[in-house]
Image (cartoon, helix red, strand yellow):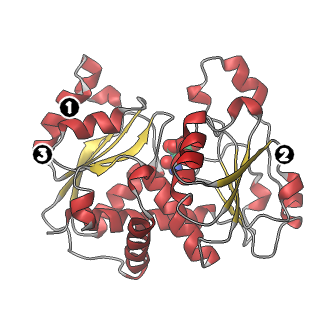
Amino acid sequence: MFKEKFKDGIISAKQFTREDISYILKKGKEMIKNTNSNLLRGKILATLFFEPSTRTRLSFESAMYRLGGSVIGFQSGDVSSIKKGESIADTIRTVENYCDCIVMRHPLEGSAKLAANFAKIPIINAGSGSGEHPTQGLLDLLTISEECGTLDGLNIGIMGDLKYGRTVHSLSILLSNYEVNLYFISPPELSMRNRYKEFLINEREAKFKEITQYRKILDVLDVLYITRIQKERFVDQEEYERVKGIYVFNKDDLKETKSTFKLMHPLPRITEISPDVDDSEKAIYFRQTNYGLQLRKALLAELLKD
Ligand code: NCD
C-alpha cells in the first residue's frame, strides 16, 4: 500500500497522513536492529545533488549499500550536463533508464515535483530550494518519537530561519498530524511563510504561536529544534549580516530546561548552538543523523522492494 501510494515518489510532507507516518516510523524502528541485509540486491539508486550536502546524500547512499543495493550519481551540478544547459526534465528522462529510484536535491523550489512529472520511477525530494525536505522531516519525527516516547502532547519550539529553511517547513507539516503545541521562534524578517501557516491553519487546525525570543519559554519546551540561518538564500547579504548571530543557544540555557528536554538540529550547525552544549544528554543532534540513516533505509526498502 505504501509503495503504491508513493509510487511517484516523496515530494512533499503534505503527502503523509498520520497512518503513513506511523507506518514508516515503525519500519524505521525495525531498521535500527536490522543493520545489513540483501533486501535491495540488484537495485540501483541515483543521487543527483545540485547543491552541497553531507548527511542527506551520504545517508541515502549508505542506506542503499546497507540494504545490498548500489548507487550511482553526482555531488554537484558542475559535473553534470546541466552545466552545459540541459534541462531537469531531460536529465531525469535519461537517468531513470539507469536506476530504480532517484534522490534529487536542487536549488529550485518546484524541482522535485517537476522531476516527478517526467519520471516513471520514484523521485525522492532531498531538498528543493527553500521549499521542502520531507525525508528530513520524517527522520526528525522518528527521532522525537524514539527519544520522547511519543509524538502527541509535546511542546515543540522550532527556531531560526523559518522563512528559507526547508527542513522546518516539512517538519511543521508532518507534526500537524499530531496533538502538538508549536512555537515558531524567529526574527520577524525570517518568520514562517504565509503559505505554510495558511496550510497549518486551514488544512490541519494546528496550534502554533509566533514569538521572537526563546528564553521565555525554555521551561515549557519538550523539544527545541534549531536551524541555521540560510546564508545562500538571502538576496540581500547585508540582511544576512544583520540576523546571522541572532540566536546562540548555550550551556546556561540548558539549565532552564526540563530534565527530559531534547535539543535538535538538522545540521550543519554554524554558530546557533554553542559547542559547549554538545556533551549534554539533552543534545541529540548527532543521534538524529543515525535516525536519518534508519529512516532512509526504511523508505528505500518500502519504495523499492519487490
Ligand atoms: C539541511 C538542508 O539541506 O536543508 N541539511 C540537511 O539536510 N540536514 C539544513 C541546512 O542546510 O541548514
Q: Rounded to the nearest whole Å, what is the CA distance between mark 2 and mark 1?
A: 45 Å
Left or right side of 207 for 39: left
Dividing the picture into quarters, in which one does residue 19 lie? Answer: bottom left
Q: Earlier in the sequence, mark 2 or mark 3?
A: 3
Question: 10 Å neighbourhood of mark 1: few (<14), some, or many (≥20)?
Answer: some
> What's the residue at 17%, 49% (across, down)?
121
Viewer-closest of 49 and 279: 49
Quadrant where the image shows the C terminus: bottom left
Q: Position of residue 207 (x, y in %)?
A: 67, 55
Task: Look at the numbered disc 3 and give the secondary structure of its residue.
Answer: helix
Quadrant where the image shows the N terminus: bottom left
Q: Position of residue 25 (x, y in %)?
A: 44, 71
Nearer the observer, disc 2 or disc 3? 2
Q: Amino acid at mark 2?
A: Gln
Q: Earlier in the sequence, mark 3 or mark 1?
A: 1
Question: 10 Å neighbourhood of mark 2: few (<14), some, or many (≥20)?
Answer: some
The residue at which mark 3 appears reads as 98
The residue at which mark 1 appears reads as 91
The residue at which mark 2 appears reads as 213
Task: Look at the numbered disc 2 and give the secondary structure of its residue.
Answer: loop
Q: Amino acid at mark 1?
A: Thr
Q: Residue furthest left?
A: 97
